[in-house]
Amino acid sequence: MPNIPKEGVNLKCALAFRRKVIYSFRKLAWEVKHDSKYSQIRAVCGISALFSFNAHTGGVRMMQHLGFVVLPYHKPLGRFGLLWENIFSWWLIWVYNETSLHSRHFLRLR
């Protein structure tokens, strides 16, 4: 993922992100299809913080367009797990988009 410039996201940054996401998905699909150690894999699953089910659904449509089935995330570890997910999210934001930390409250990350 490209670092987000201090002045914020621009078209160049968005296009770089798109290019890298598509490249990653294609590389993953190629590996699963051509490497015999993955011959039993029938699905790839992951968690994304790019969108929310109770907010704008553009991210859901984008993932569906890429061939994914999108399901709501259920927190298996409850509030304890949420704390660790927030710590990880905070760290990712600090690494890739430090500027946005000023507008985010740690305990309200989703």
Image (cartoon, helix red, strand yellow):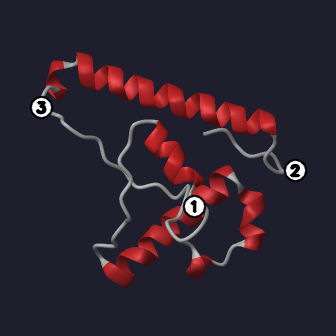
Q: Is residue 4 above or below residue 34?
A: below
Q: Position of residue 84 (x, y in %)?
A: 43, 72
Q: Quadrant of residue 91?
A: bottom right
Say which quadrant the N terminus sits in: top right
Label ID, residue 7: 2
Q: Is residue 16 above or below residue 107?
A: above
**CA–CA distance in space, label 3 to label 1:** 34 Å
Q: Amino acid at mark 1?
A: Trp
- Under circle 2, the secondary element is loop
Q: Position of residue 18 (x, y in %)?
A: 62, 34
- For marks 2 and 1 on the same chain, the one whose residue lies earlier in the sequence: 2
Q: Is residue 107 above or below residue 10?
A: below
Label ID, residue 91: 1
Which residue is drawn at the image coordinates 87% and 50% (left, top)?
7
Q: Which residue is mark 3?
A: 40
- Under circle 1, the secondary element is helix
Q: Amino acid at mark 3?
A: Gln
Q: Is residue 20 above or below residue 81?
A: above
Image side of residue 50 versus residue 17, left or right:
left
Which residue is drawn at the image coordinates 52% and 48% (left, top)?
61
Which residue is drawn at the image coordinates 66% and 78% (left, top)?
105
